[in-house]
């Protein structure tokens, strides 16, 4: 296990999407596919850290993610009340994570230009270009580059890495599809949900 663990935005959302709703005189659990893996890891790992970038971005997307989860689990339809219940419980779980479980680390204006250059350099290689274009297609994105906040999160993690052994947990392809490249360039370990599950089995 690493001394410190940073849940990137996508992992924070997976952790938070877990709600119990009334269903035929009992309760039905609606949760993200990887919720159990992430929740188990959070319970067993060492220190949890986050940055202001991760916190703000997570709050910005949690409600949309909760609505999409309900549509996936129950199908698109008139599920307004269920959506609200899942949104409320998921946002409460997210707030508890940031307030009581994870420690906020303050990073002042990290330089993310080297990260942007890193992805541009990848694009300039045949293998890197193929992976980035495939990821762009999968995400239905307008650009092959990561979102600006993703670049900042990597820069913040590298800054924190100077003082501690840590890993970045993510389900975002701009992180997980380039685990080896990020590790080789920045000495930053990126774990996907498969890696997390393996570590859970060893704990």
Image (tube, grey):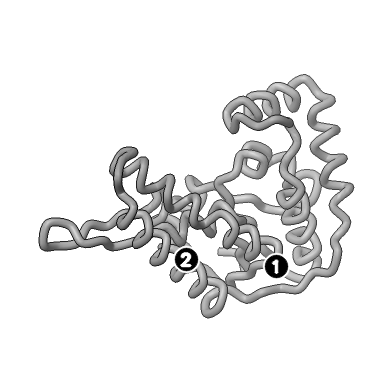
Dot 2, crowdedness within 10 Å: few (<14), some or many (≥20)?
Answer: many
The alpha-carbon separation of the residues under discs 2 and 1 comes to 16 Å
Residue at 76%, 52% in the rendered image: 187
Specify the quadrant of the image occupied by residue 173: top right
In the structure shown, which secondary structural element does the residue marked by tag 1 occupy? helix
Mark before the other along the chain sequence, 2 or 1: 1
- Which residue appears at 75% of the width and 24% of the height? 129
Q: Which mark is residue 91?
A: 2
Residue located 67% across and 27% down the image: 131
Q: Is residue 129 above or below residue 199?
A: above
Q: Nearer the viewer, residue 109 or 61?
A: 61
Residue 202 appears in the rendering: no
User: Which x, y percent locates residue 143?
Assistant: 73, 31
Left or right of 111: which side holds 96? left
Q: Residue at x 41, y 55 (%)?
A: 35
Q: Position of residue 182 (x, y in %)?
A: 74, 44
Of the numbered discs in the image, which one, if any, rests on residue 11?
Answer: none
- 142 sits left or right of 87 in the view: right
Locate residue 138: give its quadrant.
top right
Q: Which residue is mark 1?
A: 52
**Figure quadrant of the N terminus:** bottom right
Q: Position of residue 93 (x, y in %)?
A: 44, 69
Badge 1: few (under 14), some or many (20 or more) residues near its Cα, within 10 Å?
A: some
- Most extreme residue toward the left, as rendered? 25
- Label 2 sits on a secondary structure element that is helix
């Amino acid at each position: 296990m690493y001394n410190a663990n940073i849940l990137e935005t996508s992992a924070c959302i997976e952790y938070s999407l877990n709600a119990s709703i009334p269903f035929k005189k009992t309760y039905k659990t609606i949760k993200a596919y990887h919720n159990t893996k992430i929740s188990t890891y959070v319970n067993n790992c060492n220190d949890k850290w986050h940055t202001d970038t991760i916190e703000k971005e997570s709050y910005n997307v949690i409600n949309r993610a909760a609505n999409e989860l309900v549509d996936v689990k129950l199908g698109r339809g008139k599920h307004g009340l269920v959506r609200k219940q899942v949104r409320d419980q998921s946002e409460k779980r997210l707030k508890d994570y940031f307030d009581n479980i994870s420690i906020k680390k303050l990073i002042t204006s990290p330089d993310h230009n080297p990260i942007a250059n890193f992805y541009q350099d990848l694009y300039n290689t045949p293998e890197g270009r193929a992976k980035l274009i495939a990821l762009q297609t999968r995400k239905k994105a307008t650009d092959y580059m990561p979102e600006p906040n993703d670049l900042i999160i990597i820069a913040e993690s590298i800054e924190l890495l100077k003082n501690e052994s840590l890993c970045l947990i993510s389900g975002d392809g701009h992180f997980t599809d380039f685990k080896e490249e990020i590790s080789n360039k920045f000495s930053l370990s990126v774990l996907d949900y498969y890696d997390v599950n393996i570590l859970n089995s060893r704990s």
